[in-house]
Image (cartoon, coloured by chain):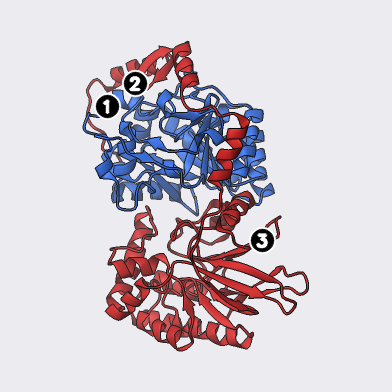
Chain colours: A blue, B red
Amino acid sequence: MTVPRVALGSLDTLWFQVAGTVCNLACTHCFISCSPTNRTHDMMSLEEVASHLEDATRLGVKEYYFTGGEPFLNPEMEAILEATLAVGPASVLTNGLLLDPARCQRLAALAAASEYSLDLRVSLDGYTAEGHDAIRGEGTFDRALEGIRHLHAAGLEPVITVTEVYDDNGSVAGKERFFSLMRELDIEHPRLKMMPVFQIGAEAERRGAYESWQRLRDEDAPADGWDHLQCSTCRMVTDQGVWVCPILVNEPSGKMGDRLADTLGDFPLAHPACWTCHVYGVTCRT
Amino acid sequence: MSQRIPEDPDLQARRAAQRARLAAHRGLATWGERLVPLATFQAASARAGRSLDSAARDAAVASFLAPRSDPTPVEGPFRRIAVCGGVYNNHYALAAWITAARQRGAEALYCLGDLGGFGPSPHKVWPLLEEHRVRVSQGNYEQSLASGREDCNCGYTDPRDNHFARLSYEYTAQRCSAAFKQWMGELPERRRVALHSPSGRRRELLLVHGSPRRVNEFLFESTTPAPYLEALLDQQQADAVLCTHSGLHWHRPLPSGRDLVNVGVLGRPANDGRTEVWFALLELDEPSGDLQVELCPLPYDHLALATEMRHERLPEEFVATIEQGWWTTCLEILPARERARGRF
């Protein structure tokens, strides 16, 4: 059995693990087990991000995404966004807990000053406090909704990101519940991003790890190749170098090089998470 | 309202224990599911991947960005062309565009695909295109219809967007003849067109549906940055790219003097509260030879279209867009900035 390899067709989407694996929560489904004390990857500085942005503009990157951990734990996050918005559109994946009114006003000002889009993606893992808090910790549902209200008041309307931690989150009825929740929050332009779960990190402990048959084989390749996988158009930068995608950052085998120019070759789809991306058609971008 | 959460009598205790373990990372790293000393992970990741020297990096980047060979024949050269985007069965706007383009002196008329969906009576579109020798390229709609796909391949996740996308796709698919679908399947995905000026300046335009890379890639103004476009134009060896698919018209002149033009669509208004639809007129400036782009609003008999849509029992949501100029469906594709400008 040979392991299929995916080529990088173009570098459209560049991710930054801008808060490392440091988070103010310890969600039970986190595929990289982020927590207040997890320093597997550490915070990135403005200087580090800026030097990769320079490489990225040369390579024709189309859009930038920031994740962690919780990006707003990074003390330089707003300066990092300002530098990014000078060269392209930016999206931040946040748990919503640090979105106080003053920060939301500053983010709105950054968005208004750029010719490119700034998108905030706030995670909700249930449409009730009971469902959400079971994954993310007590009281986090109310606090995330508070953050969403503050964004809305500042004129920024977030995308709600929902993982399919419960079967009914991803059903048509479940999606409708999330849309009606957004309408209750007076969000005029509701947007929803669904993500399947990856059975790695904390999630492996919550609902079980991958089984041995969940691997990609050469014969699984669609007729037009592996272009549907996000790794054919993305890379992920952390404080320790450049990884193939946002999912495999806790696997040293997912690291492709130190700088973007080292990572323009192909990558073996050997990890069981690659199977999830193929089967569920995953892209982490909005 | 309550959410179906799997029952677990020990949930509280298990959750507390799991959180304690998750938070117990001080000095440790997560390697997959294992906890290992931080130094072990860092040493492994330091060994992983490549670290090229600077000459090898330059070579890797140059080869990654190298121009791609493209056998597409070059059409023209023309002095002035008119280019429209998705028609979405709007034969009223298509007829008005043909008249306007001729009146404005366009030597050639181009349509960038997405002929169907949304509007009424798909069979009225093809004769207009043929009679007026409109040069059409293939959109995702033509690809889907020609290959018998079950949907338009726009990739929505919102059930509401999906409902309306499916409804209009099925309406169109049932009313296009086999011959029309076969013709769609034979359309080129990309065209190259040369423009020239009286003093002999020449520019080559690449015409595509979504983007030069993917037929269903959306190029919106707020999410298509200049550095990306410069690299794309280098790679595609063109002075400008003309596209549609996203439904909104815009033009970005680049620092290098090249251009990206999204010509908009004829099928529905631009989510701006106006009833006109949009197209582009292109020619070269004299004497600079720069591309001159005019994005033109096109009034047409939108009330007749609305009447015909109602007669065909198409959704009131679609008719409202035609009458009021605000998008009511397929909103999910819009980035934050473009979405905020609309009513819905």
Quadrant of the image containing the N terminus of chain B: top left
Label whose residue precedes the other's in the sequence (3 or 2): 2
- The amino acid type of the residue labelled 1 equals Ala
Identify residue for label 1. A209
Identify residue for label 3. B258
Tag 3 and tag 2, C-beta contact below 8 Å? no
Marks 3 & 1 on one chain = no
Identify residue for label 2. B33
**Residue name at image x 27 percent, y 67 percent:** B148
State whether residue A173 is above or below residue A124.
below
Q: CA distance from mark 1 to mark 2?
A: 9 Å
**Residue name at image x 67 percent, y 75 percent:** B196
Marks 1 & 2 on one chain = no
- The amino acid type of the residue labelled 3 equals Arg
Residue A210 lies, in percent from the top left, at 26, 29
Quadrant position of residue A247: top left
Query: Position of A264 compared to B162: left or right?
Result: right
Q: Residues within 10 Å of mark 2 (few under 14, many from 20)?
A: many
